[in-house]
């Protein structure tokens, strides 16, 4: 299994059928440099426009429509000591009458201390003097080329993945995407040094990152929505708006997964009805993202 370095000179703000930047074999690892959501590189130089410029795509030999592409996230590390956020909560996450009380939507800068693993807002309000938060790097936007020759904006998400902005897409997590075109054409980018659930400020702490992933092909696994596994258990991902539709997609995909493993509808009802956990991954983007999780402690066997 080979390890490849990918330092792109071009980026895409859509996930689609773009010319491959790299071709790898099943099981290979890629160390990819990713610029931030606004197109700034590790030196803070703006090299592309937003939203969420993608590194790639990566062509994976052997991946064909009807397969699933596994993406094991091995490591994510910011590559500069600053990031940025927005200074206000998103208008859609508070009551409408509360919106006029929100602050202007400026872009404050944050300091990223890699050695200490802490992230600190610069020029913070007095009430946050001395405050910082633990760094918890994650991938905000990644996925495979959609079906039908589409190129989908990196501002949003769908069955192919995309801008899902879930804090659970961190090192140690494996995600499977449904392959729709030969080679899968995998894209990744939009690194965050840290972010809370829902991306309710419209950003995490956005920064350039080095992302290490291992890519694998699961033949004939015709999944419909992304699936994954981490230390806590298995999960499925639904992307849609309104929020209940995203939940429906994620729940249906988890039900399919259980049925594939030999459970009938009654067993699915028992397992999910009494054991399921949901996480609101994103409620800012055009498509919201919901995670349906069946924890390891209740997964049969």
Image: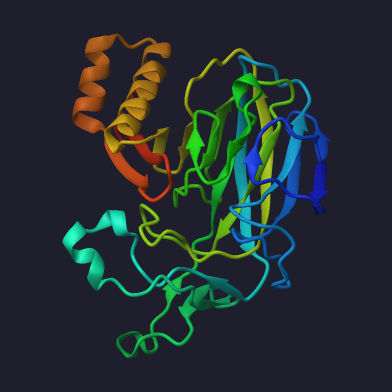
Where 149 falls versus 282 (above or below)? above
Question: Looking at the picture, how far across and down is residue 153, in whole percent?
Answer: 57, 41
Question: Looking at the picture, how far across and down is residue 89, in whole percent?
Answer: 33, 64
Q: Is residue 301 visible?
A: no
Q: Quadrant of residue 38?
A: bottom right
Question: Looking at the picture, how far across and down is residue 70, in whole percent?
Answer: 61, 31
In the image: residue 269, left or right of residue 161: left
Q: Residue at x 56, y 16 (%)?
A: 221
In what quadrant of the picture does the N terminus appear?
top right
Q: Quadrant of residue 290?
A: top left
Q: Nearer the viewer, residue 131 or 117?
A: 131
Question: Looking at the picture, how far across and down is residue 139, in whole percent?
Answer: 56, 51
Where 135 falls versus 147 (above or below)? below
In what quadrant of the picture does the C terminus appear?
top left
Q: Residue at x 31, y 36 (%)?
A: 242
Q: Residue at x 68, y 35 (%)?
A: 186
In the image: residue 36, left or right of residue 227: right
Q: Residue at x 56, y 71 (%)?
A: 83
């Amino acid at each position: 299994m080979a390890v490849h370095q990918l330092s792109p000179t071009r980026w895409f703000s859509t996930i689609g059928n773009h010319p491959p930047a790299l071709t790898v074999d099943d099981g290979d690892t890629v160390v990819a440099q990713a610029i931030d959501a606004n197109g700034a590189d590790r030196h803070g130089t703006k090299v592309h426009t937003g939203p969420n410029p993608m590194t790639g795509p990566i062509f994976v030999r052997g991946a064909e429509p009807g397969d699933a592409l596994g993406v094991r996230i091995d490591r994510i590390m910011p590559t500069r000591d600053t990031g940025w956020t927005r200074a206000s909560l998103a208008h859609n996450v508070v009551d409408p009458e509360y919106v006029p009380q929100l602050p202007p939507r400026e872009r404050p800068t944050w300091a990223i201390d890699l050695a200490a693993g802490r992230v600190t807002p610069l020029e913070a309000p007095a009430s946050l003097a001395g405050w910082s938060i633990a760094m918890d790097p994650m991938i905000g936007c990644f996925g495979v080329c959609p079906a039908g020759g589409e190129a989908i904006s990196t501002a949003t998400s769908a069955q192919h993945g995309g801008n899902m902005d879930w804090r659970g897409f961190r090192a140690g997590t494996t995600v499977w995407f449904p392959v729709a075109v030969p080679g899968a054409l995998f894209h990744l980018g939009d690194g965050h040094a840290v972010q809370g659930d829902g991306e309710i400020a419209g950003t995490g702490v956005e920064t350039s990152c080095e992302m290490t992933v291992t890519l694998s092909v699961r033949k004939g696994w015709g999944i419909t929505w992304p699936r994954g596994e981490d230390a806590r258990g298995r999960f499925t991902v639904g992307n849609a708006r309104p929020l209940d539709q995203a939940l429906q997609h994620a729940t249906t995909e988890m039900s399919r997964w259980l049925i594939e493993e030999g459970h009938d509808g009654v067993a699915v009802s028992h397992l999910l009805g009494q054991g399921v956990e949901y996480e609101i991954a994103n409620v800012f983007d055009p498509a919201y993202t919901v995670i349906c999780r069946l924890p390891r402690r209740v997964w049969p066997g």
